[in-house]
């Protein structure tokens, strides 16, 4: 059936902590859509931080569900919802004391009432252990090598991170701990996989310590200390589209957490802090999307040959405006069950609306295919020197 699918799609998931429960809602709706594997083929999925976690769960669910009796998209969607249910504050102490305390402290720091400080000693390790336990409870990393070999026509997973020591920004493909490994063809698979590749993308300082990963080969260990790459690959768009021609997407769907527009000029300290974070978070994404538009223009002008390059249509799926206006920066650590369910429901509705209008490239979901301002005039003569 996949050979009959004409449209290849890559999905890029922006980071945002707890707010990426919205991403889980979007992905769940897309993965359950009847058009998956019939109308469109998912060839790559990746993200940063919470977006990387959602991408990894969706990716594994599609692999694990390939041999089951049901639809593999349903398996992936169920994994996403199970993660956010387990990640929520569901015991009385967490719901009534711990989670409100953490969110409240963040709001006081954002408002400038309290200074920003590192967590109490031991809290970083507990946060990492909890997240690692959640991932290992849902993704069987020991089974991944066999699954990858058994299902070569699966989407490529990409999780972005940054080496805290060298400053090198990396993308881990297919959960491979070697940041230099690339999946260059459909049947390629890594020699090893590790949960640390997903943890590295979610290691937001100072909440989590840097994740140490052995990226060496054989008996020559080479360690990297990795943090979340929110300021460089949020999400890793360039890597998602820089593939072999047969694996390159026709469409890129960006699940965006941080809004570009703000209806008001922020003046309160907490609003200023939140807006600065949103702008810096969107910076790398805007640059990489501009790069795609520039490539599209060069293809249209004949500068790049169509047999080697293909234009890519870009769509953005964002939160509904009423929900986005209610969120503040501290909500990125809020694990209140009702709050997370609301984000998931909004993601589901936004994805439903997008899928209904997906074939209308003039709808509000789609980006302009070419740069807005740069329209060179072709001339065969040079102006005279002054």
Image: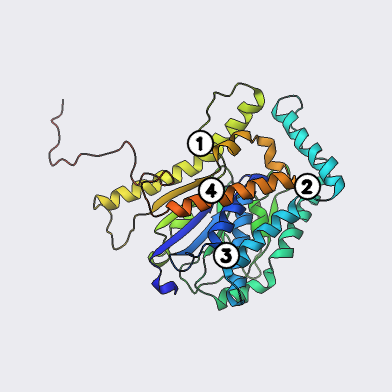
Question: Disc 4 to disc 1, how far (Cα)?
Answer: 17 Å
* Location of residue 3 by image quarter: bottom left
The image shows residue 47 at horizontal and vertical percentages of 56, 53
Question: Quick check: marks 4 and 1 in contact, CB under 8 Å?
Answer: no
Q: Residue furthest right?
A: 93
**Of label 3 and label 1, which has the lower sequence position?**
3
Where is residue 234 shown, x and y percent of the image? 55, 46
In three-dimensional space, the C-alpha distance between marks 2 and 4, rounded to whole angstroms, equals 34 Å
Query: Which residue is nearer to you in this view: 250 or 244?
Result: 250
The residue carrying mark 1 is 260
Q: Are marks 3 and 2 in contact (CB under 8 Å)?
A: no
Q: Which residue is mark 4?
A: 350
Discs 2, 1 touching: Cβ within 8 Å: no
**Mark 3 and mark 4: Cα distance apart in space:** 28 Å
Nearer the camera: disc 3 or disc 1: 1
Q: Residues within 10 Å of mark 4 (few under 14, many from 20)?
A: many
Q: Which label belongs to residue 174? A: 3
Q: In whole angstroms, how far apart are the C-alphas of marks 2 and 1?
A: 31 Å
Give the residue number, with chain letter if any, for mark 2.
124
> Which of pointers 2 and 1 lies earlier in the amino acid sequence?
2
* Colour scheme shown: rainbow
Task: State the image quarter where residue 131 is shown.
Answer: bottom right
Residue 176 can be seen, yes or no: no
Q: Contact (CB < 8 A) between labels 3 and 1?
A: no
Of mark 3 and mark 4, the one earlier in the sequence is 3
């Amino acid at each position: 059936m996949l050979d009959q699918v004409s449209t290849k799609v890559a999905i890029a998931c922006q980071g945002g902590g707890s707010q990426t429960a919205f991403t889980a809602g979007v992905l769940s709706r897309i993965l359950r859509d009847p058009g998956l594997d019939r109308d469109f083929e998912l060839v790559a999925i990746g993200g940063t931080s919470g977006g990387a976690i959602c991408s990894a769960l969706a990716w594994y669910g599609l692999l694990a569900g390939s041999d089951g009796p049901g639809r593999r998209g349903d398996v992936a969607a169920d994994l996403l919802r199970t993660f956010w249910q387990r990640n929520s504050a569901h015991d009385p102490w967490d719901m009534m004391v711990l989670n409100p305390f953490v969110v409240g402290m963040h709001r006081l720091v954002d408002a400038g009432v309290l200074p920003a400080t590192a967590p109490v000693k031991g809290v970083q390790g507990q946060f990492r252990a909890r997240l690692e336990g959640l991932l290992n409870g849902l993704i069987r990393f020991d089974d991944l090598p066999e699954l990858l070999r058994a299902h070569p026509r699966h989407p490529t997973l990409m999780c972005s991170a940054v080496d805290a020591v060298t400053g090198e920004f990396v993308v881990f493909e297919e959960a491979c701990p070697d940041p230099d490994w690339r999946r260059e063809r459909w049947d390629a698979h890594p020699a090893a996989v590790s949960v640390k590749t997903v943890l590295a993308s979610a290691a937001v300082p100072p909440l989590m310590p840097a994740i140490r990963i052995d990226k060496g080969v054989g008996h020559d260990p080479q360690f990297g200390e990795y943090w979340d790459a929110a300021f460089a690959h949020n999400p890793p768009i360039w890597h998602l589209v820089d593939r072999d021609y047969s694996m390159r997407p026709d469409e890129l769907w960006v699940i965006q957490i941080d809004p570009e527009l703000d209806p008001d000029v922020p003046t309160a300290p907490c609003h200023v802090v939140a807006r600065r974070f949103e702008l810096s978070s969107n910076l790398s994404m805007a640059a990489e999307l501009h790069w795609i538009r520039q490539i599209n223009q060069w293809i249209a002008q004949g500068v790049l040959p169509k047999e080697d390059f293909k234009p890519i249509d870009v769509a953005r799926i964002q939160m509904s405006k009423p929900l986005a206006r209610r969120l503040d920066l501290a909500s990125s650590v809020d694990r209140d069950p009702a709050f997370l369910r609301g984000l998931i429901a909004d993601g589901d509705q936004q994805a439903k609306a997008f899928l209904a209008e997906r074939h209308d490239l003039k709808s509000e979901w789609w980006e302009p295919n070419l740069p807005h301002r740069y329209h060179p005039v072709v001339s065969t003569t040079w102006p005279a020197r002054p």
